Image: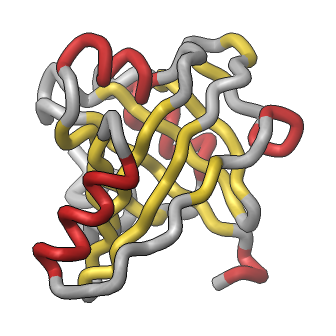
C-alpha cells in the first residue's frame, strides 16, 4: 500500500450539509466570533458540467466558507436535483459530509481510490479547477472530496 496514496495527508476542508445556510452560517459566525460569510450558488450546469452517478445533473448548491487557519469549513445547502449532497440530506439529515484534499492528477487519483473500493459518485468543475466526490463511507465513514486546482491559480 502507498504510504500517501493521494500524495498528501493534509485535510484542507470539512464539508457540512445543511438545510438552511443562512441560519447555520450565522450560528458558526457567532460561535467562531467572525463575520458571517456571504453564501453563493455553485456554477450552473453549463460551467460545472456536473455528473452524478455517471450521468449529467443540473444539481447546484448554496455554499458558504469559513477559513479557520489551515482548515476551511464549507457549508452546503443542496438544491432539489440529484446529487451526493441531496442524497446525504435526505438519508442522514444535516451533518458532516466530507473531508477534502488538494491533489494533482485527478484521473489517476480517482482510479486509485476506486481500486480501493471508494467509487466515484459525483464530479464537476468550478472556476479554477475541478472536484470529485469519492464514496469512502464503507471504510472511512465519510466521503472524500478531491480538489484539483488549475496550475495558474496556485
- Left or right, 31 with reference to 87: left
Could you say which quadrant of the image residue 66 lies in?
Answer: bottom left
Query: Residue 29 versus residue 145: which sits nearer the camera?
Result: 29
- Indicate the position of residue 42 as horizontal and vertical percent values: 65, 48
Residue at the image point whose x is 77% and y is 82% from the top: 152
Could you say which quadrant of the image residue 35 lies in?
Answer: bottom left
Could you say which quadrant of the image residue 11 lies in?
Answer: bottom left
Count of labels in the image = 0
The scheme the figure's colours follow is: secondary structure
Seen in the picture, residue 82 relative to 48 is either above or below; the reply is: above
Seen in the picture, residue 154 relative to 6 is either above or below; the reply is: below
In the image, farthest residue toward the right: 46
Seen in the picture, residue 126 relative to 149 is either above or below; the reply is: above
Residue at the image point whose x is 37% and y is 58% from the top: 74
Query: Residue 22 versus residue 97: which sits nearer the camera?
Result: 22
Q: Quadrant of the N terminus?
A: top left
- Indicate the position of residue 153 as horizontal and vertical percent values: 71, 81
- Indicate the position of residue 97 as horizontal and vertical percent values: 26, 38
Q: Quadrant of the C terminus?
A: bottom right
Residue at the image point whose x is 55% and y is 14% from the top: 82
- Left or right, 104 with reference to 17: right
- Indicate the position of residue 86 as horizontal and vertical percent values: 43, 21
Residue at the image point whose x is 75% and y is 41% from the top: 48
Seen in the picture, residue 141 relative to 105 is either above or below; the reply is: above
- Left or right, 48 with reference to 107: right
Query: Residue 147 versus residue 85: which sits nearer the camera?
Result: 85
Amino acid at each position: 500500500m502507498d504510504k500517501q496514496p493521494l500524495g498528501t495527508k493534509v485535510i484542507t476542508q470539512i464539508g457540512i450539509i445543511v438545510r438552511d445556510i443562512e441560519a447555520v452560517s450565522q450560528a458558526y459566525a457567532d460561535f467562531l466570533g467572525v463575520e458571517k460569510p456571504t453564501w453563493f450558488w455553485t456554477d450552473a450546469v453549463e460551467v460545472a458540467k456536473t455528473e452524478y452517478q455517471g450521468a449529467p445533473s443540473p444539481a447546484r448548491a448554496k455554499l458558504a466558507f469559513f477559513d479557520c487557519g489551515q482548515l476551511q469549513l464549507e457549508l452546503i445547502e443542496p438544491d432539489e436535483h440529484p446529487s451526493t449532497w441531496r442524497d446525504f440530506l435526505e438519508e442522514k439529515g444535516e451533518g458532516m459530509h466530507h473531508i477534502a484534499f488538494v491533489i494533482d492528477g485527478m484521473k489517476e487519483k480517482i482510479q486509485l481510490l476506486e481500486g480501493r473500493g471508494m467509487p466515484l459518485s459525483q464530479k464537476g468543475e468550478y472556476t479554477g479547477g475541478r472536484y470529485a466526490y469519492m464514496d469512502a463511507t464503507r471504510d472511512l465513514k465519510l466521503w472524500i472530496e478531491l480538489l484539483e486546482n488549475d496550475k495558474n491559480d496556485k
